Image (cartoon, rainbow, N blue to C red):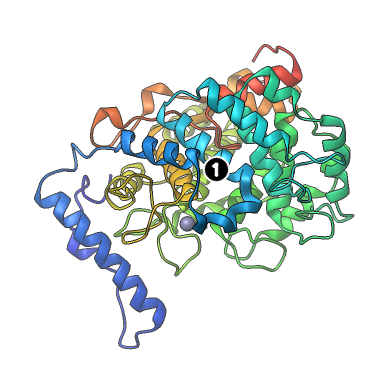
């Protein structure tokens, strides 16, 4: 459908404000206006069908960062694996080669961050942390060589995962650290890629995540906390890994997720009544392939006649406006100097570059879960991750056809082929 490519009238899409303005309504109006100006210019110049992803300038932006970061980024010293992952994943999505030199540097950087007692720290000598361990494993998956895989000490990693586990099934982010649903997702995603998911590791976790879902359908960081796009992704993806999505109220989560796509901006907000932000293009955008798979799976369990009708409908249409999200990313989130941004008038950073591109990929590609191949088989989490594949006939590429980037895995956020390669390495060759 789209905002500009659809039949909607741009000027009618501003949100209604009452006579009592607040700081929130003021910044919402300001944001809408800044996006409107860009959309209006694109509409007046009839650019919608030719709009371009500035691929070369984004590649240059990332590569310049790989040469060295400026002093203002010293605060990211505890996020080295994140920087590796954001940059490598961006290059991978954009179709740029991960050169031998990059492979060597990536392996050398990450190898210095692994701790003898298991897991990875954010910088040399720093304690292991679930989020940076997730980022380190993802970066190694993108590098994708035997040397990268063999760097992971799976034995100590597994022992350390268990140290993060609490009796109620939740995970802390680091020993002595805070509990939140990111811990469960980061541990389970990394454990899936390295074949470390066991009943011992997952005991009680799905029941704990269920408690994080709120009355409005969103999933919060822990039970009783407001739902949030990032936490909702972590909660749902972790449930998918464990094959326990049925514990969640899926229709309610779907209603919450669809309400987060903004009517004028076309991008997503992370929570109701908050501003649009490019990074939620993935955190919220990737909820939809997961939700679609869950709903389609439920239909598969119904009688066949009903199933064929409803499944076809799900696959033919999308649960979110894929054109509108691409309009927001391509028109409002590309920095003229390269890199992608949160919203107009902000500067680019590697985090938003990675997640805007991941969201763009999610909007362009229809990645589905292949139920036919799963039928009648006992599936572990590695096998389930392998069953995601792109339905090539259902691509939506806004603007220049060369805007197409690679398809990303909706559970791990790594290019699909890299997930397959790593799983085949750690589980042995399998038929799917
Ligand atoms: Zn953001």
Picture quadrant of residue 275 = bottom left
Q: Against 176, is 5 above or below?
A: above
Q: Against 217, is 150 above or below?
A: above
Picture quadrant of residue 176 = bottom right
Left or right of 51, for residue 390: right
Of the pair 343 and 118, the residue shown nearer to us: 118
Q: Is residue 239 something one can see in this rendering?
A: no
For disc 1, the neighbor class at 10 Å (few under 14, some 14 to 19, many from 20) is many
Q: Quadrant of the C terminus?
A: top right
Circle 1 is placed at which residue position? 291
Of the pair 136 and 254, the residue shown nearer to us: 136
The spot of residue 140 in percent (x, y) is 64, 30
| Residue located at (18% from left, 38% from top) | 49
Left or right of 241, for residue 72: left
Left or right of 73, for residue 23: left
Of the pair 146 and 414, the residue shown nearer to us: 146
How many labels sit on residues?
1
The spot of residue 98 in percent (x, y) is 50, 25
């Amino acid at each position: 459908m789209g905002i500009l490519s659809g039949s909607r009238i741009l000027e009618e899409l501003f949100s209604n404000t009452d006579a009592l303005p607040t700081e929130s309504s003021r910044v919402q109006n300001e944001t809408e206006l800044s996006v409107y100006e860009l959309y209006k210019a694109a509409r007046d110049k009839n650019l919608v069908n030719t709009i371009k992803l500035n691929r070369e300038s984004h590649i240059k932006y990332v590569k310049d960062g790989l040469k060295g970061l400026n002093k203002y980024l010293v605060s990211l010293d505890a996020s080295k694996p994140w920087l590796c992952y954001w940059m490598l994943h961006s290059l991978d999505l954009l179709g740029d080669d991960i050169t031998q030199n990059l492979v060597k540097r990536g392996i050398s950087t990450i190898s210095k961050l692994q701790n003898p007692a298991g897991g990875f720290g954010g910088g040399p000598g720093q304690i292991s942390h679930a989020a940076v361990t997730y980022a380190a494993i993802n970066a190694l998956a993108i590098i994708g060589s035997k040397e990268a895989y063999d760097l992971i000490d799976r034995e100590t990693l597994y022992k350390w995962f268990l140290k993060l586990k609490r009796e109620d099934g939740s995970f802390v982010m680091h020993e002595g650290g805070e509990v939140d649903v990111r811990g469960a997702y980061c541990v389970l995603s990394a454990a899936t890629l390295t074949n470390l998911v066991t009943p011992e590791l997952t005991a009680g976790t799905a029941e704990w995540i269920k408690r994080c879902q709120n009355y409005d359908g969103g999933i919060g960081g822990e039970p009783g906390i407001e739902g949030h796009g990032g936490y909702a992704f972590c909660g749902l993806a972790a449930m998918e890994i464990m094959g326990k999505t049925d514990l969640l109220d899926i229709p309610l989560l779907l209603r919450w997720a669809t309400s987060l796509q903004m009517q004028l901006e076309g991008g997503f907000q992370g929570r109701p009544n908050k501003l649009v932000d490019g990074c939620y293009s993935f955190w919220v955008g990737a909820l939809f392939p997961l939700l679609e798979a869950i709903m389609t799976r439920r239909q598969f369990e119904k009688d066949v006649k009903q199933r064929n009708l409803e499944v076809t409908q799900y696959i033919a249409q999308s649960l979110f406006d894929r054109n509108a999200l691409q309009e927001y990313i391509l028109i409002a989130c590309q920095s003229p100097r390269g890199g992608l941004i949160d919203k107009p008038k902000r500067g680019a950073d590697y985090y938003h570059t990675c997640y805007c591109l991941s969201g763009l990929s999610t909007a362009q590609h229809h990645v589905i879960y292949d139920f036919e191949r799963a039928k009648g088989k006992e599936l572990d989490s590695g096998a389930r991750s392998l069953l995601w594949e792109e339905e090539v006939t259902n691509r939506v590429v806004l603007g220049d056809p060369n805007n197409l980037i690679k398809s990303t895995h909706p559970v791990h956020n790594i290019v699909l082929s890299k997930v397959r390669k790593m799983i085949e390495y750690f589980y042995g060759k399998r038929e799917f």
